[in-house]
Every structure is written in C-alpha cells, then in structure tokens.
Amino acid sequence: MIFILILSLLISYYLYTWIKFYFSPLYRIPQVPELPFLGHNLYFLGSNVDTLNLLENWIERFKDEGVFKFRTFAGMKEYTIVVTNPSDMKYILSRPDSFKRNDFFPQFLPLVGDGLLVATGEHHRFQKRVILKALSQSSMKSYLPVFNKHTDVLVKLWMNIVKDKPNGTNLAVKEYFNNLSFDIFGEIGFGYEFNSQTTEINALVKTFKDAAEGVLNLKARFFLKYFPFIRYLPWGPGRLMQESEKIGRDLVEKIIQRRRDKINCNSLTEQEKHDLLSRMMTEKDDKTGVGFSEKILRDNAYTLLIAGHETTATSLPGFLLYFAKYPDYQEKARKEIHDNLNGKLNLTVDDLNLIPFTTAFIMETLRMFTALPMNARLSKVDYKIGKYEIPKGCNILFPTWALNKDKESFDDSCEFKPERYFEGSKLKNGTSFTFGYGPYNCVGKNFAIQEIKIVLIKLMQNFKFSIDEENLKTFRKVFLTLKYFPSIKIRVMPLS
C-alpha cells in the first residue's frame, strides 16, 4: 500500500512538472532529441565521448536559432540553455545585475566562501580593486624572478630525462605543469615553498590539486545538488570531502598566521613584502578606504591558490601541442627567441616585448585551446533571444571554446593562424572570450600571459617538441577546467 502511494506521488509529480513545462516558454526553445526520463545523459556517457565536439555539433546545428536547450539529470525538467552567438554572450555577461553568477563554486568548493569567484555587485568590485593592485604591471617586475627560478627547475628535470635520448621521450606534460604552476603561485601569492616539482607530493598540496582538478565529477555534482546532506555524512564521499576541506582550511590558516607573525616581527623578505598575501593584508580600497576583513582574506587566499595555478597549468600543454602540430611555427618562434634573446636566462618584462610572433602564437593558442571552456549565469529577468523567451530562473551556458571560433568574429575561424594577432591586423570583433568578458572577467590575465611567455621561452631554448600519431587520439571532458583523456603526451627532445 505504501509502495503504491509513493509510486503514485512520484508519477503525479512527474506529470505536474511536465504539464508545467509544456505551458512554459522553455518548451518552445529547440533541443536535441532526448529519451524519456534519461534526458541527454546517453550522449555524454562513455570514456571515448568528446564533450566539446558533441556540444560544438549541437551549437552548429542551432546556430541560426541563437539558442537551444538540453538536460542531463534523469526525470527532471531542469534545462540548461546554451547561447550560440557572441553578441548575446556579451550582452548577458556585461549585465551582472540581471544575470547573476550561479551556485557552482559555493556548492562544490565551499572554501572559496565569498571570495572573488563568488562575490557579486559592489562586494565583487571592491575585492577586484584591491587584488588588482597586486597584479599591476609594476608589481609584475618583482614576480618575474620567481617565474624564472621555478621554470629553470622544470628545464633541469626534463633535461635529466631526455639528455641521452636524441629522439626524445613521451611525457605526460600536464602533471609537470601542475607542479610548476603550483610552485610559482605558492611563492608569488603567499611566499610559501611547496617544492612540488622536486619533492614527493604531500597532503596539503594534494588537497588543492584535487580541488583544482575537479574531483567532483558530473555524478558527484548530481548527487550533491539533489542530496546535499551527502556532504555531511561521516563516511564515504561525505567524509572525504570533510577531510579535504579541513586540510585546505588548516593550510590557509597556517599560511596567513605565519605571514602575520613575520609582519609583527618585521622580518618579511623583499619578495614577501610585495606578494599577493601581503598586499591583500595591507592594501586599502582607493574608493572606500577599507581593506579586507579576516573572512574575505581567508576566502581569497583559498580562491587564488586554486584559480591562480590551475588555469595556467591546463593551458600550458596546449602550447606544446600546437608547437608539435605546427613545426614551422615552432621553428619560427624558436628563431625569434634565439635572435632576440640570445639565450638569456634571467628574463625581464622588456625581454617579453621582443617576441611578437611568439606572443601572437600564444594568443591564438589561448583562443583555440580554452582552459575554461564554459561559463554560466542564472537569469534574474526574462530575456529574449531571437524569437525565444528565456524566463528568469534559467541556467544559461556559454560555450567559450566554441564562441572563440565564431565565423562572424574571426576569418577562417577554425584555422590555427597566429598572424591574425600580428600588430596591424584587424580582428572583426576584437579578442576571444578565453579570459571571460564583462565585470567578472579574469583579474589574472596579464599575470598568466607573463608566466606563459617565460615558460615557453625557456622550454624553446632547450627542447624541441613533436607528437606521435597515436597520442593525437584523445577525448576532452569538462570538469572545473578542460581535461584530456588520456592526458596529452608530447615527445620532448633535447635541442642540439
């Protein structure tokens, strides 16, 4: 009897949601055919399904419509709305009061608290103004020696691996770049020596790497969304999440307290006086005269440690991949680096302005190989795209990697052409969306590009890169950032 009652309630609820959906404007938005109850789940299943190719085909299919919808969770009329035109993306992303950030980060990475990745409105603008002081062009000069130092460690590691192998060896480069970027940001951000390139990984480092790698996959995301109590269970996934968050919280507290002790003892090094943590602890907002509270300091320390290294580490394999796929471009960049820098080891800001072709190569790779391939907003107002109404309360997805290849914005948009970024060339609509758009765009864009330039210069001074045909067979998935399965393997050869 109870079973029949429960079953009747479930059927009634499903019929209610379906009838409600039928009379909603959402019903009229085009979508890919789906199976009852299963939604579009079957499209995404399987280790050999390339998520980006799948969505890109859908985007091309509905390009003229300007929008389409899909759903991933069984039995739920909860749709994701996908925007297919850059103009609509620009409109929505530039109006944060009407289209707010969704709850992804606070739900799945609660230690970001109310930091820069989560804050909205004036609270976000205040945090951004303070943090940008530490990421100014003048501040970058003090960061470059750290870029140089840790990249030299990577060069030495790779040279020890390949020095006796003239034909080189295949390396899963992502893990090396994870360690490199983590060490760089640990020191520049917090004066903290993680030494993850040269020592065995410890629990503290693993916590942040796991968070940045997106260990909460789509299945975990579903269960947490509809069964949030799982996070608080004293066993299984709940216990693992609690332990991971505690380690992360303890590390941030330790880093902040160590810095406060050094400030009180007036024993900061010159590097520590100018790093991100010291600046966040001491800077005042020019507009309000207010600095960060203890909570905002902690939230942003965790936020920057995660965001500050993962996107760069995800992007770096892409540069080697495109150097390997386009050997003529690789040699042109290497010749430019050789002719203009002549083997210089301690690179300066002025040096980074002497490599225009390599810079164009970097910008084109960032357009084609997008570390954060998606962005999303939650509509607070009704909005119309073409003839379709998007009611408030909808989750709107922006496929950044696909809009970066929009035919109206870029000539030969699917072709890899660094020359489109040469000085004097005319892009139809400016730049790509790799670093976001609007008030929530990436504050660390210049920081990331400077780091990428130094890493690539030093690698090109010492190695050549190619890729074996079998290693081109990879599939892309989206977690917090773009992931390749299996991981990208590049043949690294010593430069004779």
Image: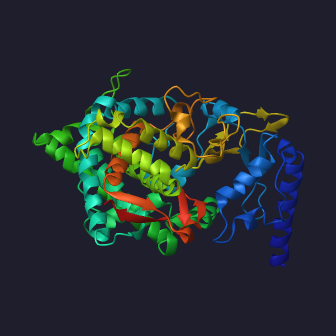
Q: Quadrant of residue 11?
A: bottom right
Question: Where is residue 439 shown, x and y percent of the image?
Answer: 53, 31
Q: Position of residue 458 (x, y in %)?
A: 31, 51
Q: How far across and down, in percent of the image, does residue 441 sit?
A: 51, 36
Residue at position x 43%, y 60% in the image: 465
Left or right: residue 185 versus residue 330 is left
Give the tally of numbered discs: 0
Colour approach in the figure: rainbow
Q: Residue at x 28, y 45 (%)?
A: 188
Q: Is residue 295 visible?
A: no
Height in image: 225 above or below 429? below
> Could you tell whether 68 is left or right of 448 in the image?
right
Q: Quadrant of residue 264?
A: top left
Looking at the rendered image, the quarter that the N terminus falls into is bottom right
Seen from the viewer's position, the closer of residues 136 and 7 is 136
User: Which part of the image, by quadrant, shows the C terminus?
Assistant: bottom left
